[in-house]
Image (cartoon, grey):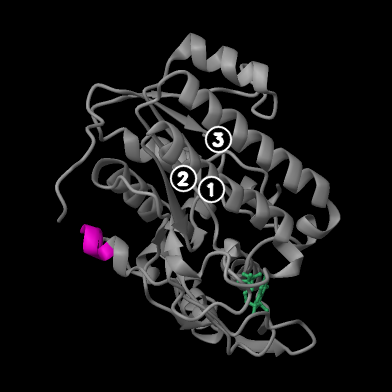
Amino acid sequence: MSDPVFCLEGKSVWVAGHRGMVGSALVRRLQSENCTVQTADRKDADLTRQEEVETWMNANRPQVVFLAAAKVGGIQANNSYPAQFLYENLMIEANIIHAAFLTGVEKLVFLGSTCIYPKLAPQPIPEEALLTGPLEPTNEWYAVAKIAGIKLCQAYRLQHGCDFIAAQPTNLYGPGDNYDLETSHVLPALLRKAHEAKVSGAETMTVWGTGNPLREFLHVDDLADAAVFLAKHYSGESHINVGSGEELSIRELAETICKVVGFEGTLKFDASKPDGTPRKLSDVSRLRELGWNRAGDLTSGLQSTYADLLADPGQLAK
Ligand code: GDP
């Protein structure tokens, strides 16, 4: 493992976006570091407003920032609110990164998203694929903002010597996910469908598309662990992919979910729904070279996520 380049011990650490799936996982993970976790609610600071961000950071003086705040949503939301996705994400990133520079933040970790890569990127996708081709048009608003966040970290490093880094997570799942079937990603959607099929005693469960596309999934607690690892062990210009490095077909995912949930009916594939891109796998060799290879297996991640859903079924109502 690479030697630590930064120490979190005794530091004040702001998790921006602590109510989201990623931010709340970071807050959980940071409990086991000897640091003080800081959070800001919307009433404390609207992150899209520069003055509010600067006032809050001047008053609270975090030494470390995990930038997990973002306006997020699925394909439908991206298509319906392009201005909001681009504007709000750009503002949040620019405000926090610039204020981090002004207030002398020692380390900032920005979290990206897989949609930053070109639609036809080579597989597995290496970090160098960034900005080598056109984006997937349905989420380019969000992607452009996330690419700007990565570039802001690089620019402040180059011009001002700031230790700002960017981590690039693959498809995430876990507690606090979006379970709305209209806007969610495949994993929470199938978890919900399997659960409801089991409860209602249905004989079949519908899976969109052919079931053939290949995808990679990472539990959000593993992402939080990797982000903390990178804060301590990495300082560099390039963003770093964070994934499990393993892929499976949507059919295999559906079968695994049915086993975890205990739904014993049959799967029905709805070919009228789009498959999307045939394969999306991140190249995690850089992360592994740095020494992080602790992604848990999918079945246990699904088991704990399902247990969390059963313990807090209100997540299905959101
Ligand atoms: P993507 O990874 O950006 O393509 O987004 P998704 O997570 O929404 O979809 C991944 C794959 O899962 C696609 O091939 C979908 O057709 C398939 N899929 C199967 N069933 C579902 C479902 O119920 N909801 C979603 N969102 N995708 C599904």
Q: Residues within 10 Å of mark 1 (few under 14, many from 20)?
A: some
The verdict on residue 168 being magenta is no
Query: Which of the 4 quarters of the picture holds residue 283?
Result: bottom left
Q: CA distance from mark 1 to mark 2?
A: 5 Å
Residue position marked by numbered label 3 in the rendering: 17
The residue sitting at 76% across, 82% down in the picture is 273
Q: Earlier in the sequence, mark 3 or mark 1?
A: 3
Mark 1: which amino acid? Lys
Residue 253 percent across, percent down from the top left = 50, 79
Name the spot of residue 201 as percent of width and height, x first. Answer: 65, 75
Looking at this rendering, what residue extends furthest in the front direction? 159
Mark number displayed over residue 151? 1
Q: Residue at x 67, y 61 (%)?
A: 184
Type of residue at label 3? Gly
* Distance between mark 3 and mark 1 Cα atoms: 20 Å
Looking at marks 2 and 3 on the same chain, the residue that comes earlier in the sequence is marked by 3
Q: Is residue 289 magenta?
A: yes
How many residues crowd around disc 2 within 10 Å: few (fewer than 14), some, or many (20 or more)? many
Give me the C-alpha separation between circle 2 and circle 3. Answer: 21 Å
Range of residues picked out in magenta: 288-293
Residue 269 lies, with reference to residue 121, above or below; the image says: below
Label 2, on which residue? 154
* Mark 3 element type: loop
